[in-house]
Image: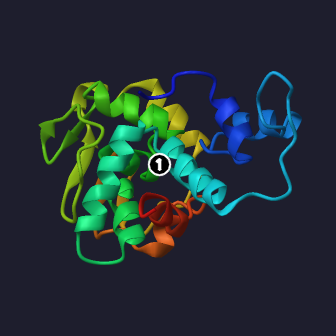
Amino acid sequence: MRYTGPKVRLCRREGKNLFGSEKYQKLLGRNPNIPGMHGGKRLGKVSEYGRQLRAKQCAKRIFGLSEKQFRKYFAKADAAKGVTGDVLLQSLETRLDNAIYRGGFAITRAQARQFASHGIFLLNGRRIDVPSAQVKPGDVIEVRPSRKTSPVFTKNLEELESYQVPSWLNADPKKLSIEVSSLPEAQHFEMLIEPQPIVEFYSR
């Protein structure tokens, strides 16, 4: 089941701004302690299992996935050719909702997921409402013509004016479109995620 409670609690639990928004950074700064009835402080020493668990939880929460969904992503990555951790993160990065977020049309991944699930975007000219759809090189993602005048995109583009779109995507703010030019590589992966402890966690 996907977590639907206050997101700041997740940020406090991991000690990181998992969702990118300045709002969570400010809230995390006000109260960095682990959430709970006693508001406990972070322990200085963490076990190897604890390190692996936190890495897995961090990645799962950043992409807004349930445990079942995340485990499926890992199983596919583990069965595929290549370095399991890299394949896992590449699969997560090439989700439709993440491509919308990385393309600079959404402030957070949660907002991008909402855009995708409401069918606001087209994928290669066809309406799609599956946030987890995998994109590949050559794919074109664009806002539906009827939604291009929505003030939300004007606001988002203004707020993200200085944002640098990663090189694996070619975003056109005027056309409200994103072309997938290549697959993301290690330097494009979410910096807050450590893949090796995740692999170790599921390999126990």
Q: How many numbered discs sit on the rendered protein? A: 1
User: Viewer-proximal residue, 109 or 160?
Assistant: 109
How packed is label 1: few (under 14 Cα within 10 Å), some, or many (20 or more)? many
Q: Is residue 79 above or below residue 49?
A: below
> What is the three-letter code of the residue carrying label 1?
Gly
In the rendering, at what x and y percent does residue 153 appear? 45, 34
Q: Secondary structure at mark 1?
A: loop
In the rendering, at what x and y percent does residue 129 appear? 23, 31
Name which quarter of the figure residue 199 lies in.
bottom left
Residue extending furthest toward the bottom? 82
Q: Is residue 8 above or below residue 103?
A: above
Q: Is residue 158 left or right of residue 143?
A: right
Q: Is residue 18 left or right of residue 61?
A: right
Residue 179: tell me if it is visible. yes
- Give the colour scheme of this rendering: rainbow
Residue that carries the numbered disc 1 in the rendered image = 104
Q: Is residue 11 above or below residue 52?
A: above
Residue occupying the point 59% across, 41% down: 19
Can you say which quadrant of the picture contains the N terminus?
Answer: top left
Q: Is residue 122 left or right of residue 30?
A: left
Name which quarter of the figure residue 77 lies in.
bottom left
Residue occupying the point 39% across, 57% down: 93
Residue extending furthest toward the front? 204
Residue occupying the point 74% across, 47% down: 15
User: Viewer-proximal residue, 195 or 45?
Assistant: 45
In the rendering, at what x and y percent does residue 133 appear? 23, 45
User: Viewer-proximal residue, 116 or 193?
Assistant: 193
In the rendering, at what x and y percent does residue 173 appear? 40, 48
Residue 22: tell me if it is visible. no
Residue occupying the point 46% across, 44% down: 63
